Image: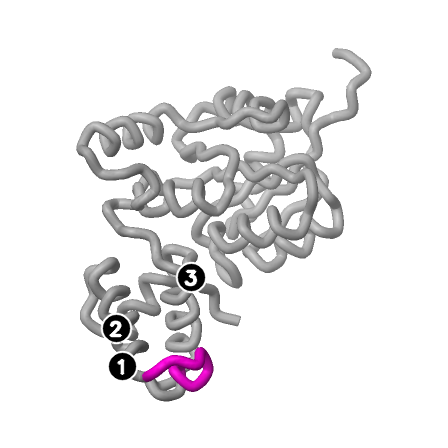
Amino acid sequence: MDDKPPIRVLLADEHAVVRKGIREFLEEEGDITVVAEASDGSQAVALAAEHRPDIAVLDIQMSGLSGIEATRRILGTVPGVRVLILTAYDDETYLFALLQAGAHGYILKTAESSELVRAVRTVHRGGVALDSRVTDKMVHQAASGRPLGTAGGIESPTRREIDVLRLAARGLTNKGIGRELGISDRTVQGHLASIYGKLGVASRTEAVTQALKLGWIVME
C-alpha cells in the first residue's frame, strides 16, 4: 500500500443488507472507504453535499428521487464528485438516460465484486466504467442504426416539452400550462402530441408516469 488517501465513497441503495455487503468488500481493499450510506435518492443528494465523496455509488430505483435525478442533482451541486451506477437493471432506457445525466459508470449487480472494485478505481482515475453486458447493448444499438442517446428508441424531449411535462405533472390544464409558459393552449396540445409520440403513450397520465421513470422530470 502507498500513502495516497483512500477513495471516499457514498453508497445509496434502498436495501440495508445490500449496502452492508457492498461496503464490506469495498473496504476489504484498503484503498477505499465508505464515508456515508443513503437509503433513498433525496438522502443521497444531501449526504453527497455534506461529505463531498470522491465517488457516489447509486442504484437506479430509489424512493424520493430516482438514481437518474439524484445523479443530475449531485453532479450539479457537488464539484468533483463522480457517479457510478450499480443496479440490477440493464435496460437501454435507463442506461442512456443515466449517461445523458452525466454518470461516469454503469455496473450491474450481477458483476463480481472485483469488477465493482475495478470500476470504482477506474472512475476515480477519471475513466468511464461500463459493464461488458452494457457495452454489448450499446454496440447492438449502434449496429441497428438507431442513434446513441435515444434510450430504447425513445427520442429525447426538447426543453419546452420538459416544461410542459412538469406543469402537466402538477395537474394544470392545457390553458393553465399555456398561461404559465406564455403560449397558446393549441401549442401546448402540439407539444403534448409530440411527447405522446416519443413515449408511445396515449394520455398525459401515462406521459407523466413515463417521464418520471425516465428521469425527465421529478415530482417536487
Q: Residue 77: where, in percent of width, then height?
A: 66, 52
Alpha carbon separation for disc pair 1 and 3: 18 Å
In the displayed structure, 30 sits above or below 36; it is above
Name the residue carrying label 1. 186
Magenta region: 177-184
In the displayed structure, 204 sits above or below 196; it is below
Circles 1 and 2: CB atoms closer than 8 Å:
yes
Name the residue carrying label 3. 159
Amino acid on which the number 2 mark rests in the picture: Gly
| Mark 2 neighbour density, 10 Å: few (under 14) some (14–19) many (20 or more) | few
Q: Which residue is depicted at the point 23% across and 70% down? A: 193
In the displayed structure, 131 sits above or below 179; it is above
Q: Which is nearer the eye, 166 or 23?
A: 166
**Would residue 125 appear left or right of 216 to someone viewing this image?**
right
Q: Residue 55: where, in percent of width, then height?
A: 63, 36
Q: Earlier in the sequence, mark 2 or mark 3?
A: 3
Q: Earlier in the sequence, mark 1 or mark 3?
A: 3
Taking the magenta stretch, the answer to whether it contains residue 178 is yes
Circles 2 and 3: CB atoms closer than 8 Å:
no
Q: Which is nearer the eye, 88 or 219?
A: 219
Name the residue carrying label 2. 190
Q: Which residue is depicted at the point 65% across and 23% down? A: 28
Q: Which is nearer the eye, 136 or 12?
A: 136
Q: Which residue is depicted at the point 35% across and 58% down? A: 157
- Which of the numbered marks, if any, corresponds to residue 77? none
Amino acid on which the number 3 mark rests in the picture: Arg
Give the structural element (helix, strand or loop) at label 2: helix
